[in-house]
Image (tube, grey):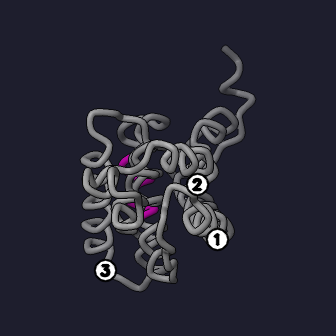
């Protein structure tokens, strides 16, 4: 009962700053590991070239996934405001119109849901999103290439690394009382 009184207060703007910085930093530091997993995957029989455009696509997948799970951890009015603040801050970072950035993120969220249907597991959607957005079907053995489906062993390898790219919304909500201003 008294747990709420023991929590520090954190305003939504600071939370959005923390989330944006964490996501950007994690992708900057972690993408090389993802690229190495892809390049060294025995399930991919042809060499895959990974470049900066892949990192940009990967970042969009990670942003979309993080915004997709946000409503599970915040109340509906809070998740909308924090999502909007995150989109505004990221649009500023990338020097794009916030409405355009939101449209792109919404497209990525829809894409992640589509490639992961019927599952709702965000981690799996991230791995499948990487597989499809990076065009990795063409690099697989004939059986999986013809099906245009990822080899389950390859997906499992990616699934193992994806949790580091999800912001720990639960930790924040357990530790802080979120306030609007």
Return the x and y of residue 51 as percentages of the image width and height.
51, 82
Label 3: few (<14), some (14–19) or many (≥20) C-alpha neighbours in 10 Å: some
Say whether marks 1 and 3 touch (CB < 8 Å).
Answer: no
Q: Quadrant of the N terminus?
A: top right
Question: Which residue lies most toward the front here?
Answer: 142
**Residue position marked by numbered label 3 in the rendering:** 97
Return the x and y of residue 45 as percentages of the image width and height.
48, 64
User: Which residue corresponds to the image point at 28% horizontal and 68% vertical from the top-left?
Assistant: 104
User: Which residue corresponds to the image point at 31% horizontal and 60% vertical from the top-left?
Assistant: 108
Say whether marks 1 and 2 touch (CB < 8 Å).
Answer: no
**Residue position marked by numbered label 2 in the rendering:** 165
User: Which residue corresponds to the image point at 26% horizontal and 50% vertical from the top-left?
Assistant: 147
What secondary structure prevails in the magenta region? helix
Return the x and y of residue 2 as percentages of the image width and height.
70, 18
Which of the two residues, 130 or 91, is positioned nearer the viewer here?
130
Q: Which mark is residue 32?
A: 1
Q: Quadrant of residue 168?
A: top right
């Amino acid at each position: 009962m008294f747990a709420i009184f023991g929590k520090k207060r954190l305003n939504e703007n600071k939370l959005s700053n923390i989330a944006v910085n964490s996501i950007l930093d994690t992708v900057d530091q972690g993408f090389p590991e993802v690229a190495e997993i892809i390049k060294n995957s025995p399930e991919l029989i042809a060499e895959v070239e990974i470049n900066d455009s892949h990192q940009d696509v990967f970042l969009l997948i990670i942003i979309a996934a993080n915004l997709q799970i946000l409503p599970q951890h915040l109340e509906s009015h809070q998740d909308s405001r924090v999502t909007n603040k995150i989109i505004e801050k990221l649009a500023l970072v990338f020097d794009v119109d916030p409405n355009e950035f939101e449209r792109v993120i919404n497209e990525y969220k829809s894409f992640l849901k589509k490639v992961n249907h019927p599952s709702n597991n965000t981690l799996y959607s991230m791995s499948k999103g990487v597989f499809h957005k990076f065009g990795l079907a063409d690099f697989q053995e004939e059986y999986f290439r013809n099906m245009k489906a990822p080899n389950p062993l390859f997906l499992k390898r990616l699934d193992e690394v994806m949790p580091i790219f999800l912001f720990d919304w639960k930790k924040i909500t357990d530790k802080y009382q979120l306030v609007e201003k």
